[in-house]
Amino acid sequence: MRPLILISALVWVGCGSETAPQPPPVGRFVYPSGIVHRQVDGSPNGALYVASANFDKCYDTGSLIALDLDSLGLPEIGASVPASGPAEITDLQVDSNNSYVQIDSFAGEMTLWTPRTGGTPRLFVPTRAEGNYLHAIDIQDRTNEGKTILNCVGASQGDRNCVPTALSLTSKIAGAVDDQPRAPAPIGVTVDDSGDQPELWVTHTEAADSPARSSKSFQTYLVHLPDAGGDSLSLSKDDFVSLTPPGLPIGGAHATAIGDRYVYVTGRNFVAGQTLVSASFLLRLVDRTDTTRILETSLSSVYQTLEARDIIRIPLGKPEEHLDKDRLYILARSPDTLLVVDVDNASSARPSFLVVSAVPLPEGASGLQILRRGDPGDELVAVTCAGTTRTLGVLVLYDTKLGQVVRQVGDVGTQPYGLAVDQRGTSAARVFVTNFGDGRVAVIDIPNIRQPQDARLVAYLGEPQGLDPKQGTSTCRQETQP
């Protein structure tokens, strides 16, 4: 009986330790994903907001951390990199009482709404854990100290846990029938801030079956929140746009770009029940004047690819020219490619599409950002690429004027994903990249955006997350919270 008693005791102790609260660490990232840079009045470097996905569920939740970049000792843009290599800044100086909040696990992209008429900026981040939440976090500046206060929308002042007041995209949907509409596994979020209120569009990567867990009657949606600026967020069935109306095959979506009339939606592989389903489209359009009207572009017949990821839209021409023409930058995968697509008659009932170029990229293209240098059509396109299992990721810079890749900044980190840009006018820029695999944020400087060949890796923010060599995943670190 002695061995049995010993085993029982060990199991009891293990269960007790698992139920003990284990909030995420305050001073480091855990599988960082979404990232946003924000300029702050009176601050030379501004603030950086980083979401941790808590991919291995080592902690109870994920987190969102605000960094005061002025206090971190980053090198000046243009400074040479010492022989010892990029600076490694591990003390993030996070204020646990103000500049840190808990969000649910598996965070995806993140976006920022800045009111045009002044007021409180707001961050939005979707998470793919069980609740399938959309989190809204308000930003308050303490100008006398240069720090940021994060407040969970709908929660009491000072509450650091945003999960209880987050908006679920899969439960308690007013008007839903047989568990549809729902948006399980939300990942992409885009905000239209041209009006007085933030207008959100959210994608999801898992098809919604009806009833839930029946593996029948799958549908995918685009969640549309026309007014997400209030003190709390709510959903009804009318806020779900079906991406699979009669006549179009079911397809998953990854990212959106917002045009004057249309929302451009990229298609990706998606999960239906227990099955991974290949993407059925590369690009679809949602008519903002009538969201039941979905346009299939058939771009996949022009350029064959497995799926797509990020997308950015640039209106071409000066405002006074009224060209009604958009340019789209789309990341395609397998083969990994930057597609440059022009949209003529972009506000008409039947826009037309032309693939201008297809630029080969390293494997694992994920994030996309644009640095503007002058008139529309003169951009520097930054792309994160994860590389292979044997190589570190790279940041690719594509010059739209030259029509070619002009720089690849190598050894950025393991599985680079999200991108944020601090652009200093039309002269210089600083790029921040979340390294999902190693738990850090890489800092890349472009001292002159007219000469992107001089881009250089200058620093890492955060501690490297430990890896289990047998599993290839992080080792859970038990940490005492302040």
Image (spheres, rainbow, N blue to C red):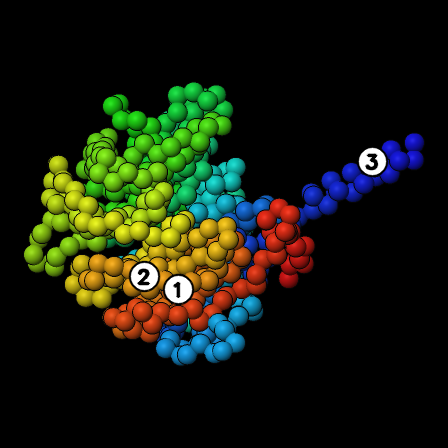
Q: In the image, what residue type sits under mark 1?
A: Val
- Identify which residue is drawn at 61% across, 54% down: 467
Q: CA distance from mark 1 to mark 3?
A: 53 Å
Between disc 1 and disc 3, whose residue precedes? Answer: 3
Residues at circles 2 and 1 in contact by the CB criterion of under 8 Å: yes
Neighbor class of circle 2 (other Cα within 10 Å; few <14, some 14-19, many 20+) is many
Between disc 2 and disc 3, whose residue precedes? Answer: 3
Q: CA distance from mark 2 to mark 3?
A: 58 Å
Neighbor class of circle 3 (other Cα within 10 Å; few <14, some 14-19, many 20+) is few
The answer to whether residue 156 shows anywhere in this view is no
Secondary element type, mark 3: helix
Residue bearing mark 2:
397
Determine whether, in the image, residue 176 is placed left or right of residue 15. left
Residue 9, placed above or below residue 410? above
Q: Position of residue 17 (x, y in %)?
A: 73, 45
Q: Position of residue 137 (x, y in %)?
A: 44, 53
Secondary element type, mark 2: strand
Residue bearing mark 1:
409
Which mark is in front, 2 or 3? 2
Question: Between residues 180 and 154, which one lies in front from this camera angle?
Answer: 180
Snapshot quadrant of residue 204:
top left
Residue bearing mark 3:
8
Q: Position of residue 461 (x, y in %)?
A: 50, 66
